Amino acid sequence: MLRTRDAGKGLLLLRRAPVFMAAAAMLVTGFFASMAEAQEPAPRRTLFQRLFGGFAPQRRTYYEDPNQYPAQPRPRRIQKRREQPAVQQRPRQQRAKPRVADAPPPAPVVEKSPNAKKVLVVGDFVAGSLGDGLKTAFEMTPGIVVETRANGSSGLVRDDYFNWPGSLPGYTAELKPSVIIVSLGANDRQAMRIGETKETFRTDLWTTEYRKRVNALAALARQDNLPLLWVGMPPFQSTAMTADMVTFNGIYLEEVEKVGGQFIDIWDGFVDEEGKFVLTGSDINGQQVRLRGSDGINLTKAGKRKLAFYVEKDIRKLLGEAAADAAVPGAEGLKDLVVTAPLANEDIVKTPPIGVTDPELDGATALLGAGAPPKVTGKSPRDLLVEKGEVPAAPAGRIDDFRLAKPETVISKPLLRNAQP
């Protein structure tokens, strides 16, 4: 019976052996899996996670079936720092903006009179600048209208480009001006074609022909006995060009005066005290302004106005009453200050002239110091002092009269009576 029981136990052990072996195999597999998981490196944290916190590193678990992955926990949200209450700052005091000066009111537009006299300005680009300046000068004058007919690149040399003797009569007939102003020469520093030959600039033949052309144009402007004002050339930044303009102005002066015209010299208005060209100078009000452009040739707005200043006074003299400016607004209250001519029936008290040599005006019969003139030796007190060392005697009563012998004083009789004991 004992052997049978032992045999039964052994048979039971044999039957359970596969179960024990399967359990042992599972233990070994789990051990190696845990070892592999332990050897897997943990993922690194980023710089953002290190500074502000981040997800906790999790170990990866591998499954053969992808459907067996457990649900991943939600990542931990980054906690935002509590915003500190803003410190109340004092409102900044805004600086007062600089007050911009009010712009002066625009000048009133003066309408020109229907019977206004016209001033015709012809010539090159200098004449165009002169016309602009004259329009500014007479903008408040209803009796004068400035008409400019200028060709910037024209002159008296290249008559094939623009012929002034052929164009001027048409301008005169169209506008019927009261005064003609000519300004030419800035573009004439070049060779001139005379007949079939081309003459070099500033030779004798060139100068002779140029004089003839200047005289012919001036005579053409004066053919209806119109006043002619020929404006000379200003200096330029180029030294050679300035020297040529001096020669041209001399020709204009001589030829224009031959036909009864008037030459206007503007040279001094655009040079310094030493006679040198200047870009900046005094305007018509004496203020330092820019007169010429950066090229040293053209004129600025102030330069144009200064150029017209030299011609404006002659125009006003020629046109007389038409050159009177319009009345200034608000001048009605100044009528009492205007000196008017006396009426015809008004008695005028005339005062005879007073003679400075008439002693009767002071009730005397002789002028002060009318005694006999002192005798003179022909030499002044200075000559006597330098040559002989003689000092003339000071007049009696003067502070430098140091004579010991004083003139006798006259004592009246009442004083003597009082002096007796």
Image (cartoon, rainbow, N blue to C red):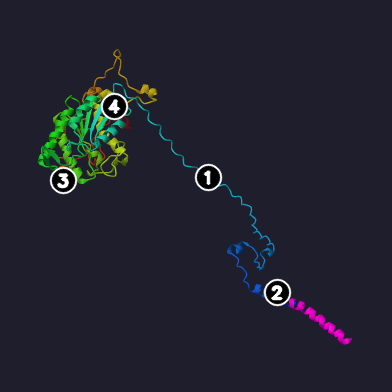
Residues rendered magenta in the picture:
1-22
SS type, badge 2: helix
SS type, badge 3: helix
Question: In the rendered structure, which disc, 4 or 2, sits on the residue that comes first in sequence?
Answer: 2
Give how far apart the Cα atoms at labels 3 and 2 are. 145 Å
Residue 30: give its label: 2
Give how far apart the Cα atoms at labels 3 and 1 are. 80 Å
Question: In the rendered structure, which disc, 4 or 1, sits on the residue that comes first in sequence?
Answer: 1
Q: Amino acid at mark 4?
A: Val
Question: In the rendered structure, which disc, 3 or 2, sits on the residue that comes first in sequence?
Answer: 2
Residue 382 placement (x, y as % from top left): 17, 42
In the image, 285 versus 137, the foreground residue is 137
Q: Quadrant of the C terminus?
A: top left
In the image, 375 versus 245, the foreground residue is 245
For label 1, the residue is: 94
Q: Nearer the viewer, mark 2 or mark 1?
A: 2
Task: Determine the residue positioned at 17% across, 36% down.
Answer: 160
Left or right of residue 194: residue 11:
right
Give how far apart the Cα atoms at labels 4 and 3 are. 71 Å
